[in-house]
Structures are given as C-alpha cells and as structure tokens.
Image: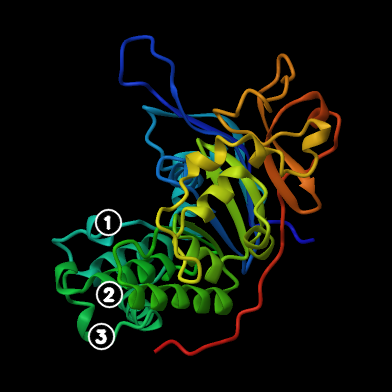
C-alpha cells in the first residue's frame, strides 16, 4: 500500500462558547481519522453540523482562531503536519498544493472583479509567471472545465454567469495551479440535477488526468454512490463508519448509517411514512446487529439505549474508532472488549473503476 496523500490523525477542534462566562467549549470535531490517496475520492457524509466542513477547513488552516482551536491531532500532507506549519508556510500550500471549492460560488467570488482577474490572482500567487502567461493559464483552465468562449468570458463578472457556470469558475480557480488534493465542500449545492451530474463528471475526469485526490463533502447519498471510492460517515464530530463505497452501501453496520439509508425515499419501495434516523438509533435491536456485539462491542451513539450500553474504560475517552472487520471501521463505545482487540487507523487505497467519458 502506498502512503496516503492526506492523513487526518485524531483531529479535535473546538470553539469558544458564546454563552455565559465559563461555559465549556463546543467540540465541533472530536477525534477524526481519515485518509485520502492519489486518484481517490473520499466522500465525507453526515447531517449538518456533524463536523464535515470544519475538518476540511482545518486541513487548510482556515478555522478562525479565536474562537476556534486545534485541541489535538495531526493533519499530514505529503508527510508534513499542516497544523504545525506557520502562516507563511501555509500560503505555499493553500491553492498551490491543496485547493478548495466552497459551497456557494456567489458568496466566494468577488462581485466587483471579473472572474478572469480572480483566477489570475490565484495563479500569480503560486506560480512564477508573467501576467500574459497567467492569463493564458486562466483561459485554459476555463476551457478545461467546459466554459465556452473562454477568451471572451474571462472578462465577465460573476453575476453574468449562471449558477452552474459560476461553479465551473470556482473549479477552474481551484485547479489552475494543478493541486494534488481538492477539497470539494458541497460542490453541487443548489444546482439542478443535470448541471450537478456535469460538475461531478468533470471532477472525475480532471481527477483521472491529474492523479488528484478528492475529499468530497456532501449529504447526498446518491452523489456518494455514483462518485466515491471510500466513504466516511460522521456524526457529532466523530467518525461512526468508514468503508469502501460498495461494502458500505451493501451492508451498513452502524445504526446511524442504516438510519440515513432508511430515511431516503425509493421508487421500488413506496412508503406512506419514511423511517427517521431517530427511530433506528433508539432501537436496541439495531445495535445488536453489529458483528462482535455479543462480545461487548457496541456502536457509539450519544443516546445509546441503556439496555445495550456497555461499561466504558475509566480514564479513557468513551469513543473509539475500531476496525470491526478487515478494512471496515465503526465508531464504538470504548469497553474492555474493545481495548483488548488490536485495531488500525483507517487507511484504504481502494479505487473503483470508472469508464472514461468525454466532457461536453
């Protein structure tokens, strides 16, 4: 197995509480582990507030401090801990080696500058090229993402583009410097399904041609099924399930993951009322489905039914990310049974086979 491009190791991030003086800090991320390999797409899924975006922002050291704080852990990129780098050192990493696509392009693009000026600025920050060369790179980047008449539209302003084209501009800006890792935070939010499919196919095509790793942050399990190699399911700042995409969709092990799947309407199984996540995770029988449950290994959940919750190990965190099966990790309660078993940190080099296609 090759070394991962990105290795997030026990990351914990908290924020100051805006409540009464002396209030405890809010733990946004509480011990996250994940890896991304070259030409691999890691999908990070979970409901709003579970810590997906904070994990991505931490990778770029974009969490505002204060009120944010990195409590522990490391984020290794090409062997270097990004959290230990100075701001000057991070300037070489951001945009140049790691790029990010934010959720809403209209709030990320400056409305008073042309899109060309904004792409060129990013290029000149990270590449030693002349203004003319930077413009040529920007035009080519716009062509690469399928923007027609790039030589003409490079002089246009963000409001002169549709939502899908603005998202393509954001991708062009992110990829103009040939980054090795792309953090895509809800890249298709608010786009219709046709444009969404085009954007995701574009990212796959660019990934194939550039050997780029992608962290795809989303709550859309349909997008995950079509695009991900490995899936990391998060809840309350913790990883609750980690597996390759086929195994996770074929046999979800954590009750929360099953709850997410059960709450999605399907055409072949119409229901008068959808099952909610809460209904699944409050059922003791759902926890008992985990392999190893009878040996004292119980899925972690903040409100685990008392009838199945095990005694935890004194003096250690209640939560542990445990390799329940080869290449399959589950967030569990740290019981004596869990501590007695050896477990690796998540590291999957799995990649699915995509058939090459032509971007129109």
Q: Would you name the residue on which mark 3 appears?
A: 151
Q: Residues within 10 Å of mark 3 (few under 14, many from 20)?
A: some
Residue at the image point whose x is 82% and y is 29% from the top:
337
In front: label 1 or label 2: 2
Q: Earlier in the sequence, mark 1 or mark 2?
A: 1
Residue farthest top in this picture: 22
Q: Residues within 10 Å of mark 2 (few under 14, many from 20)?
A: many
Residue at the image point whose x is 71% and y is 39% from the top:
288
* Depth check, front residue: 258 or 245: 258
On screen, 187 above or below 314? below
Query: 186 left or right of 340?
Result: left
Residue at the image point whose x is 54% and y is 44% from the top:
234
Q: Earlier in the sequence, mark 2 or mark 3?
A: 3
Q: Residues within 10 Å of mark 1 (few under 14, many from 20)?
A: few
Query: 121 left or right of 300?
Result: left
Examine the image and state in which quarter residue 159 appears. bottom left
State how far apart marks 1 and 3 are (Cα): 22 Å
State the scheme by which the image is colored.
Answer: rainbow
Would residue 81 be seen by someone viewing this image from the given angle? Answer: no
Residue at the image point whose x is 61% and y is 80% from the top:
354
Q: Which x, y percent locates residue 144?
A: 40, 82
State how far apart marks 1 and 2 are (Cα): 14 Å
Q: Would you name the residue on which mark 1 appears?
A: 108
As helix, strand or loop, the secondary structure at mark 2 comes to helix
Q: Which x, y percent locates residue 59?
A: 51, 46
Query: 131 left or right of 276?
Result: left
Q: Earlier in the sequence, mark 1 or mark 3?
A: 1
On screen, 22 above or below 64? above
In which quadrant is the N terminus drawn? bottom right
Q: Which x, y percent locates residue 116?
A: 25, 72
Q: Would you name the residue on which mark 2 appears?
A: 165
């Amino acid at each position: 197995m090759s070394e991962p491009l990105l290795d997030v190791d026990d990351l914990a991030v908290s924020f100051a509480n805006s409540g009464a003086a002396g209030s405890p800090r809010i733990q946004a991320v509480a011990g996250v582990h994940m890896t991304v390999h070259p030409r691999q797409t890691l999908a990070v899924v979970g409901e709003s507030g579970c810590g997906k975006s904070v994990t991505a922002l931490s990778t770029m050291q974009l969490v505002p401090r204060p009120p944010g704080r990195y409590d522990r852990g490391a984020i290794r990129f090409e062997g270097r801990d990004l959290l230990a780098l100075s701001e000057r050192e991070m300037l070489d990493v951001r945009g140049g080696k790691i790029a990010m696509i934010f959720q809403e392009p209209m709030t990320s693009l400056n409305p008073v500058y042309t899109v060309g000026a904004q792409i060129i600025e990013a290029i000149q920050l990270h590449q030693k090229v002349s203004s003319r060369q930077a413009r040529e790179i920007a035009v080519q980047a716009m062509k690469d993402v399928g923007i027609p008449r790039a030589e003409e539209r490079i002089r246009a302003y963000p409001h002169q583009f549709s939502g899908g084209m603005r998202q393509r501009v954001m991708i062009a800006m992110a990829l103009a410097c040939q980054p090795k890792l792309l953090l895509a935070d809800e890249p298709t939010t608010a786009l219709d399904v046709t444009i969404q499919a085009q954007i995701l196919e574009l990212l796959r095509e660019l990934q194939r041609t550039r050997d780029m790793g992608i962290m795809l942050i989303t709550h859309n399990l349909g997008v995950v099924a079509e695009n991900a190699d490995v899936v990391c399911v998060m809840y309350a700042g913790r990883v609750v399930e980690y597996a390759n995409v086929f195994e996770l969709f074929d046999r979800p092990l954590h009750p929360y993951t099953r709850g997410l799947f059960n709450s999605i309407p399907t055409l072949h199984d119409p229901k008068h009322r959808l099952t909610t996540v809460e209904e699944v995770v409050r059922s003791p029988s759902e926890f008992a489905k985990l392999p190893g449950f009878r040996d004292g290994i119980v899925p972690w959940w903040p409100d685990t039914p008392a009838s199945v919750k095990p005694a935890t190990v004194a003096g250690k965190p209640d939560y542990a990310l445990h390799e329940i099966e080869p290449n399959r990790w589950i967030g569990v309660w740290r019981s004596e049974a869990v501590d007695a078993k050896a477990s690796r940190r998540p590291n999957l080099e799995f990649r699915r086979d995509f058939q090459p296609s032509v971007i129109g």
